[in-house]
Amino acid sequence: MNDLNRRVFLLSPVAAGSALLLGADAARAQVVMVSEKDATAAALGYTTDSARVNPKRFPNHSSAQKCGNCELYAGRPGDGTGECRIFTGKRVSAIGWCSAYVLKG
Ligand code: SF4
């Protein structure tokens, strides 16, 4: 590729699209998961697996309640993790749970 062709390529929609994809990959690589030990997570009893919820602490919890079917979950169906509106900028496990759970309507 000579200089002229390289300049034409760099100005092309293909190059712009590639740059956007690389930027999206970089953003995806910086995913931060909510830790069960985070102060807010601990206060809400967040667990990364709904099957591990303590029934004595949360007697109204049911095993059918999971982040993946919570109104506050913003992940895509089928993804293992997704953002939660409670934990801005962090992701939760799709099979996780916390006491702020609201069944998706
Ligand atoms: Fe999961 Fe919903 Fe709690 Fe967020 S609010 S951690 S999506 S159960």
Image: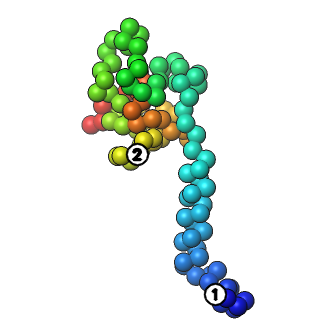
Q: Which mark is residue 79?
A: 2
Q: Quadrant of the C terminus?
A: top left
Judge whether 1 appears above or below 33 on screen.
below
Colouring of the image: rainbow
**Would you identify the image quadrant in which residue 10 lies?**
bottom right
**Whole-percent x, y for residue 3 in the image:** 72, 89
Mark 1 residue element: helix
> Could you tell which of marks 1 and 2 lies nearer the N-terminus?
1
Residue at disc 1, CB closer than 8 Å to ligand 1? no
Residue at disc 2, CB closer than 8 Å to ligand 1? no
Q: Do the residues bearing badges 1 and 2 touch, measured as CB atoms within 8 Å?
A: no
Judge whether 40 appears above or below 75 on screen.
above
Q: Residue at x 56, y 28 (%)?
A: 35
User: Which quadrant of the render holds ligand 1?
Assistant: top left
> How far apart, in angstroms, are the residues tagged by discs 1 and 2?
38 Å
Q: Nearer the viewer, mark 1 or mark 2?
A: 2
